[in-house]
C-alpha cells in the first residue's frame, strides 16, 4: 500500500468506528409503520401497488422506516382503514377516496366521477391544477394527509349476457355498479347492486345479477368474469381514471425528520405513476387474451346510450355538489378543469389517437 492509501484507509477505519459507535442509537430509532389497505392481501394491481409503495419507502429510507402492509381484515376491516389511520392505530392507509363519502361527500371527486377526468387529466388537476390542495383541505379535519397512489386508467363498461342496443335495454337490468355510477344506472331504469369483488363471479354465474362492472381486462380476467358473461362493453363511462390513494396520519408524518417526510411523499408519487404503467401494460395483454383465446365479444355502447348516461351523470354529480359547501367547491374546480382539458385533449390526445386509428 502506498502511504496516501494507508492514510486514507486509516481515515475510513476511523470513520467506520465513529459510525459503529453511533449505530446502536440509529438502530433504536428504526421507525415501524403499519399500512392498512382496503384490498385483499396481494390483490393484482391494487394490493400489489400497496406492497410496491411500502417497498419503495423501506428501500429509499435505507430501512430507517419499515412499513408493513396489512390486507383487508388483517388488522382492521376494508372500510375501517380511514378511521384507523385518523385515530393513529396505523400510520398509513391505501384505498380509494369514494369509500369515504360518509365522512365527506367531496372525497368522491378524488377517486372517480362518471364522465369525469382520465388518469392523465386527474394527475394534471391534482398536481398542477389545484386538486391536491382541495383534497388536503377535505382530509384535514380527520388529521390525514392524502396522496394519489395509483390509477387504473379508463375502466371497462362491464360484462353483459345480452346486447345493449338502446337505453331501453338498460331497463330492469340488475347490474353490480357502486357509487355515483350506480345512481346514474338507477335513473336510466336499471337496478344497481352493491357487491364486493369476491362475490361478483358467483352472482353473475347464477343469474342473481344480469351484468357487472369491475375494473378492466387484467383484473376482470383474474376473476374469470369472461366465463360468466358473453359481451364485454366499453368504455367505462362511470370510472374514466380511477385514482387510488394513500393517506398518512398527519402527526406521524410530521414527527419524521424532513428527509424521511420527503421520502414518504416522493414514494407515493412514484407509486402513483407506476400503478398506471402496470395497468396499461397488463390490460393490453389481457384484452388480447380475452378476445383471441376466450372468444369474448367486445362491444361499444351505442352513442345514444352514452349520451343519455352523460346527461343523467351531469345531473347526479351536480345534485351531489349542491349538498354541502366543500363538495361544491371541489366540484367547481373539477368541472372547470374538465372543460378546459376536454378542449385541449380534443386537439391533442383524442385527435392523435383518431389519426393513428385511420392507419
Ligand atoms: Ca369499477
Image (cartoon, rainbow, N blue to C red):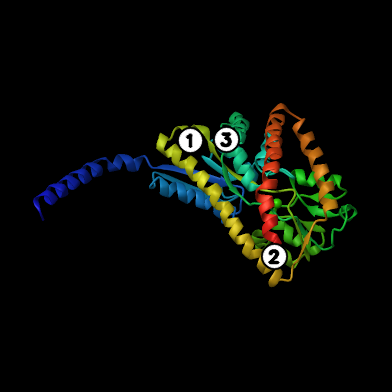
Query: Which of the marked residues, 2 or 1, is nearer the chain's N terminus?
Result: 2
Residue under numbered circle 2: 224
Cα–Cα gap, marks 2 and 1: 40 Å
Does residue 43 appear in the picture of this structure? no
Q: Residue at x 67, y 55 (%)?
A: 353
Q: Regarding mark 2 in the picture, which secondary structure is present there?
A: loop
Cα–Cα gap, marks 1 and 3: 12 Å
Query: Which of the marked residues, 1 or 3, is nearer the chain's N terminus?
Result: 3
Percent x, y of residue 206:
80, 63
Query: Which of the marked residues, 3 or 2, is nearer the chain's N terminus?
Result: 3
Determine if the C-beta at disc 1 is less than 8 A from ligand 1.
no
Q: How crowded is the residue under tag 3: few (<14 C-alpha within 10 Å), some, or many (20+)?
A: many
Residue under numbered circle 1: 253
- Taking the image as shown, residue 188 lies to the left or right of residue 16, namely right
Q: Nearer the viewer, residue 88 or 3?
A: 3
- Taking the image as shown, residue 237 lies to the left or right of residue 55, namely right
Percent x, y of residue 19:
25, 43
Determine if the C-beta at disc 3 is less than 8 A from ligand 1.
no
Amino acid at each position: 500500500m502506498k502511504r496516501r492509501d494507508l492514510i486514507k484507509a486509516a481515515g475510513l477505519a476511523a470513520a467506520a468506528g465513529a459510525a459503529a459507535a453511533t449505530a446502536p442509537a440509529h438502530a433504536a430509532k428504526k421507525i415501524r409503520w403499519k399500512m392498512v389497505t382496503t384490498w385483499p392481501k396481494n390483490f393484482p394491481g391494487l394490493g400489489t401497488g400497496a406492497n410496491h409503495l411500502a417497498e419503495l419507502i423501506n428501500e429509499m429510507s435505507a430501512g430507517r422506516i419499515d412499513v408493513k402492509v396489512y390486507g383487508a381484515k388483517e388488522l382492521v376491516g376494508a372500510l375501517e382503514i380511514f378511521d384507523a389511520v385518523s385515530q393513529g392505530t396505523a400510520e398509513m392507509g391505501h384505498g380509494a377516496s369514494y369509500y369515504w363519502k360518509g365522512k365527506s361527500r367531496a372525497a368522491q371527486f378524488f377517486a372517480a366521477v362518471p364522465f369525469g377526468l382520465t388518469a392523465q387529466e386527474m394527475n394534471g388537476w391534482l398536481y398542477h391544477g389545484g386538486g391536491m390542495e382541495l383534497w388536503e383541505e377535505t382530509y384535514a379535519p380527520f388529521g390525514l394527509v392524502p396522496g394519489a397512489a395509483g390509477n387504473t386508467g379508463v375502466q371497462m363498461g362491464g360484462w353483459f349476457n345480452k346486447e345493449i342496443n338502446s337505453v331501453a335495454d338498460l331497463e330492469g337490468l340488475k347490474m353490480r355498479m357502486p357509487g355515483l355510477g350506480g345512481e346514474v344506472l338507477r335513473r336510466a331504469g336499471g337496478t344497481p347492486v352493491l357487491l364486493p369483488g369476491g362475490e361478483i363471479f358467483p352472482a353473475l354465474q347464477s343469474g342473481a345479477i344480469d351484468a357487472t362492472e369491475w375494473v378492466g381486462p387484467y383484473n376482470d380476467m383474474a376473476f374469470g368474469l369472461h366465463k360468466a358473461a358473453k359481451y364485454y362493453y366499453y368504455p367505462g363511462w362511470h370510472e374514466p381514471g380511477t385514482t387510488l390513494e394513500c393517506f398518512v396520519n398527519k402527526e406521524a408524518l410530521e414527527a419524521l425528520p424532513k428527509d424521511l417526510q420527503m421520502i414518504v411523499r416522493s414514494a407515493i408519487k412514484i407509486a402513483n405513476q407506476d400503478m398506471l404503467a402496470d395497468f396499461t401494460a397488463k390490460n393490453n395483454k389481457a384484452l388480447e387474451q380475452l378476445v383471441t383465446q376466450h372468444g369474448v365479444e367486445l362491444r361499444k355502447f351505442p352513442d345514444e346510450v352514452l349520451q343519455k348516461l352523460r346527461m343523467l351523470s351531469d345531473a347526479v354529480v351536480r345534485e351531489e355538489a349542491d349538498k354541502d359547501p366543500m363538495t361544491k367547491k371541489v366540484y367547481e374546480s373539477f368541472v372547470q378543469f374538465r372543460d378546459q382539458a376536454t378542449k385541449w385533449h380534443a386537439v391533442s390526445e383524442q385527435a392523435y389517437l383518431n389519426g393513428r386509428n385511420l392507419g
